[in-house]
Image (tube, rainbow, N blue to C red):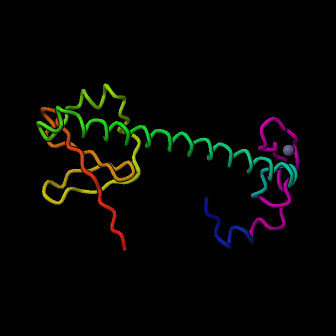
Amino acid sequence: MVRTIKQLNRISNRTYPSKLCKKEGCKTEFIPTDGRQVYCCSQHRIDSNNDKRKVIDKFERNFTSRVKSNEKILIKIISSPFYIKNGFTHYVFLEHEGYDFETFHFIEYDEETNREIQFCYKHGVYMIDAEKKHFKITIKEKNED
Ligand SMILES: [Zn+2]
């Protein structure tokens, strides 16, 4: 929520109603000195922010392991005899390997078809035939300056 200056002035002399500390497991009731205060003390604010950081770190570690696994799958598929022979893969192969279509680093669009290419590191995958569920894998060459 964004408070306007006008609103802040209007409530500045107010005594705030008591709140429950948002730190997990604290449950201390306190009277905020500022409408935005959500923790009973600064230590609980710090602790809580550290906990949030840990959650983010964990999320990032999970994300990294998923994109790594995805790229490994793309590398495996692109060097498979089927891919080398046909120049594409089928959805079932990706699915069988456990490819996670929800996880990718970034998206680019194929110049010709405008199809969405999902990249994990430098390996990208995109659908070339929705009906037949054919996918192509592309490798992004890094521009070395
Ligand atoms: Zn607290």
Rendering quadrant holding ligand 1:
top right
User: Quick one: quadrant of the N terminus?
Assistant: bottom right
Q: Is 16 in front, or is 79?
A: 79
User: Quick one: quadrant of the C terminus?
Assistant: bottom left
The answer to if 137 sits in the magenta stretch is no
Q: Residue at x 17, y 32 (%)?
A: 82
Q: Is 86 in front, or is 42?
A: 86
Which residues, given as a range, are shown in magenta? 10-35
Q: Is residue 35 above or below residue 79?
A: below
Query: Residue 94 at x, y = what percent?
Result: 29, 32
Among the 4 quarters of the image, the one containing residue 24 = top right
Q: Residue at x 20, y 39 (%)?
A: 135
- Residue 67 placement, left or right of 132: right
Count of picture labels: 0
Among the 4 quarters of the image, the one containing residue 97 = top left
Q: Is 13 in front, or is 28?
A: 28
Query: Residue 5 at x, y = what percent?
Result: 68, 73
- Residue 80 placement, left or right of 73: left
Query: Residue 144 at x, y = what percent?
Result: 36, 69
- Residue 73 placement, left or right of 42: left
Q: Is residue 89 above or below residue 56?
A: above
Q: Residue at x 79, y 43 (%)?
A: 23
Q: Is 28 in front, or is 15?
A: 28
The answer to if 18 sits in the magenta stretch is yes
Among the 4 quarters of the image, the one containing residue 125 = top left
Query: Residue 86 at x, y = what percent?
Result: 11, 37
Q: Is residue 109 above or below residue 58?
A: below
Q: Residue at x 18, y 32 (%)?
A: 81
Q: Is residue 107 above or below residue 94?
A: below
